[in-house]
Each structure stands twice: as C-alpha cells, then as structure tokens.
Image (cartoon, rainbow, N blue to C red):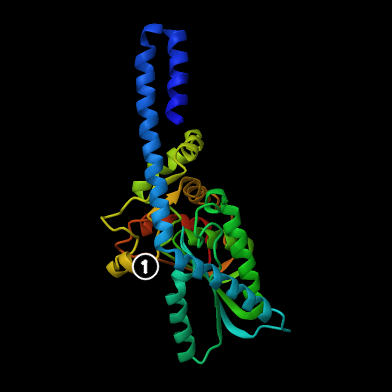
Amino acid sequence: MEAVWASATAFVLGTCLDASRAPTISALAIGLASLLWLQRRRCRAAEESSIARIDGLACGARDDALQVHDAGLALAGGSGPRYQRGILLITGFADPPADVAELGSAFDRQAAERSETLLWLAPRMPGWGRTNFTEAEKVSWREWVLEALNAYRMLQRCCESSTVVGISTGSIVAALLAERVPIDKLVMLGPNLAPCRDDETIKRLILSPLGACLVLLLPVVVKKKRNGRPSDTMNSQHWTSGYYHTALPMAAIREMFRVQDQLSKTWKARQVLLVRGMEDGTTGSLQENLAVARRYAPPEV
C-alpha cells in the first residue's frame, strides 16, 4: 500500500513538473517505499521475536511490580517507619524490575549481616515489562518520573532513611526525582546523564523536526550491537538466558533522549555517588557524566 501511494503521488507530481520524468520518479518512489516496507517488516519481526523470547520474564516482572506496590501500601498503613533503611531501584531504559532482582538480593544479604531492617522497591517503569510495545510507543518521560516519585513517597513512609539507586537512564529519572524531594543518598550506576559519542548524532536527528517523521515511518528499530555484544552486559551467559530487547520503539528512544535534557535544578541530595564500568559503551564517559552531575549536585556534596 505504501508503494502504491508513493508511486501515485510521485507520478502526479512528476506529471505536473515534467511529464517526461514521471515514470522515473515513480520507479524511484516505488523502490524507496519497498525498501521502507521491508525495513518496517524486519523491525516488527525483531519486536515479535524479542517479546516472544522473554514473554515469561516480562509477565513475571509485571506481577513482581504489583506485589511490591501491594506490600508497600500495606506497610505504609502503620503509624511510623518500620525499616531502618529503604532503597529505591530505578531500572534502566527498557528494563523490567526482574532485571534488578539479583541486586536486591545482594542488599538483603548485606542487611542481614548488619542485623539491619531493609526494604527495597523496584517499580515497573511505564512502557517496559510488558509482552508488547503498545505502552512503550506512547510513554512519556514524565511518566517515568511520576512512577519513581510515587514509589519514593511510599518508601519514605516505611523507612527511617532512603537511598535512590538509578541505573543507566534510570539515573536521570533519579536525578529528576532529587530535584523534587530530599534524598539521603543518590547513587547512579552506569549513569546516562550524557549520551555516548556514538549516540550524539542519533540524538540530534531524533530530537529534530525530522524525528517525528522517523517515529511514523520506523516505529520500531532493531537495537544496534555495541562491540559485537547483543545486550549491554559483558556476561555472555546473559546473552542466551537473560532479559534484553533486540528491538526498541522509536518513540521511546526519543523520550530517552528528551529526558537527558530535562535537568534544571540543584539536587536535594546529601550524598551523590557515580559508578561506571570501564567497558560500558552505552553511556557517555565518567568525566562527561561527572561534568553534568557537578552542575546540579549541591556545592557541599
């Protein structure tokens, strides 16, 4: 259908401008539309494959998120804090809560060794942890911040002190949270405050007026491999058994780049810690992220 509309439009325009060139213009339009159609089919196939491969994990992540919320709301009904420490884990772009379960278990073991009562929450960020991209294609970065804010308020009611841990793009959401509410400790793992150099050109293109056209023409794109790795981790076992997408919605990618430009106020955090792996190729360098953090971290931190 796209090829038919493109060729018809090109034929009409070509006839009006130069009738002798109409067939050539139509042929080029058909070729371009055919390539576009094939690319969209390839992307949608990648989406279906990506979702099907992690279908069970995605559903599990959704259920875990609901259980966390239910438990938190029940605990919040008490007269005061019931935990000494609380940790809010904000997952990265396209990651479900199940992705940080191992990290949460490590926090549990550490708390047990210290004889400390601990509650950690990992809310499902809107758009992710579902069995399709319907929600992700309509998500706004504001929804990520709102979800984090609601979870943090729940944590505050239950805990004497609270730590916010943002992972990758979750670090930006954590920073925007710190602009709005006081936080004892703000931790950023693999912070995505600044894009990696490979993504700078892509960011400018997607955020330009042409970006809206790209979202319509290519709603889903195949996720590019970095250093030959199918996922962002160096753990090769994760490549075959872990959770990761092989395709991503263009609209959600646009929101990821948009949220990087939303920082505007000093963070209300007593402590700020940035941690970045040496082989992390998905975000800007530690120096670039530190430069951004220094602009917004309190002078005394």
- Extreme-right residue of the structure: 79
Residue at x 34%, y 16% (from the top left corner): 24
Asked whether, in this view, residue 135 is left or right of residue 4, the answer is: right
Left or right of residue 31, residue 250 in this image: right
Residue 234, given in percent of the width and then of the height, sits at 29, 65
Most foreground residue, 104 or 38: 38
Task: Give SS at disc 1.
Answer: loop
Residue 182 visible in rendering: no
Image location (x, y in percent) of residue 218: 44, 40
- Position of residue 210 relative to residue 56, above or below, is above
Residue at the spot 45% in from the left edge and 91% down from the top edge: 113
Residue at (41, 7) in percent of width and height:
18
Judge whether 286 appears above or below 30 on screen.
Answer: below
Q: Would residue 35 be visible to someone looking at this image?
A: yes
What amino acid is found at the position of numbered circle 1 in the picture?
A: Gly
- Mark 1 is surrounded, within 10 Å at the Cα level, by few (under 14), some (14 to 19) or many (20 or more) other residues, namely some
| Closest to the observer, 61 or 195 | 61
Residue under circle 1? 242
Judge from the rendering whether residue 169 lies leftward or rightward of residue 280; answer left or right. right
The vertical placement of 186 against 220, above or below, is below
In the image as oriented, which residue stretches furthest toward the left? 228
- Front residue (pair 74, 148): 74
200 left or right of 267?
A: left
At 42% from the left edge and 76% from the top edge, which residue is drawn? 102
Image x and y of residue 135, in percent: 56, 53
**Residue 238: % across, % down:** 33, 68
Instruction: Pick whichever, 263 or 123, lies toward us.
Output: 123
Quarter of the image for residue 240 reads bottom left
Query: What is the count of numbered marks?
Result: 1
